[in-house]
Image: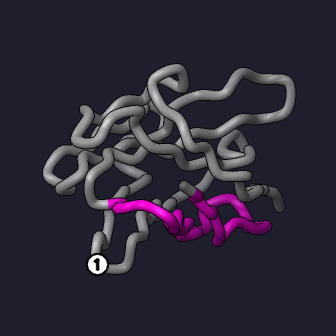
Amino acid sequence: LQLVESGGGLVQPGGSLRLSCAASGFTLAAYAIGWFRQAPGKEREGVSCISSTGGTTNYADSVKGRFTISRDNAKSTVYLQMNSLKPEDTAVYYCATTFQRWGPCTLRPSGVTNWGKGTLVTVSS
């Protein structure tokens, strides 16, 4: 099982980025997927998650109204569209799966596995 994140980079405050989480070696469609982030000196936190079918999504309060999670199971990819970015969004962003197939969406880092290596997002002028 492998997840690979991409799409990070340097963006000015107020800008946008779209992150991708591509899966290989397993059926992505069977798993809820979460996006998490870790800023320097801080604990990893949940950002957003999406159920296996895409019918349920959840967001951390800090990103509600600015970030949108989606998935294309045919392409084995989950996306995180990030708009109105703020300097406090600067972090390494990771995606991960639930432990069990068809498991519920979760924002708890302890509730997921199969972490990717992350992609760095830097919001700065």
Is residue 111 within the magenta segment? no
Tell whether 90 sits left or right of 18: right
State which quarter of the image contains the N terminus.
Answer: bottom right
Is residue 9 within the magenta segment? yes
Q: Residue furthest left?
A: 55
Tell whether 64 sits left or right of 90: left
**In x, y percent, where is residue 9?**
76, 68
Viewer-side residue, 49 vs 24: 24
Viewer-side residue, 86 vs 82: 82
**In x, y percent, where is residue 11?**
73, 67
Give the labeled residue for mark 1.
Answer: 74
Viewer-side residue, 20 vs 4: 4
Tell whether 23 sits left or right of 91: left
What residue lies at 21% left-to-right and 56% top-to-bottom? Answer: 54
User: Circle 1 — which element?
Assistant: helix
> Which amino acid type corresponds to the residue marked 1 in the rendered image?
Ala
Question: Dot 1, crowdedness within 10 Å: few (<14), some or many (≥20)?
Answer: few
What residue lies at 73% left-to-right and 47% top-to-bottom? Answer: 92
What residue lies at 31% left-to-right and 72% top-to-bottom? Answer: 72
The magenta stretch spans which residues?
2-28
Is residue 124 shown above or below 115? Answer: below
What residue lies at 81% left-to-right and 57% top-to-bottom? Answer: 124
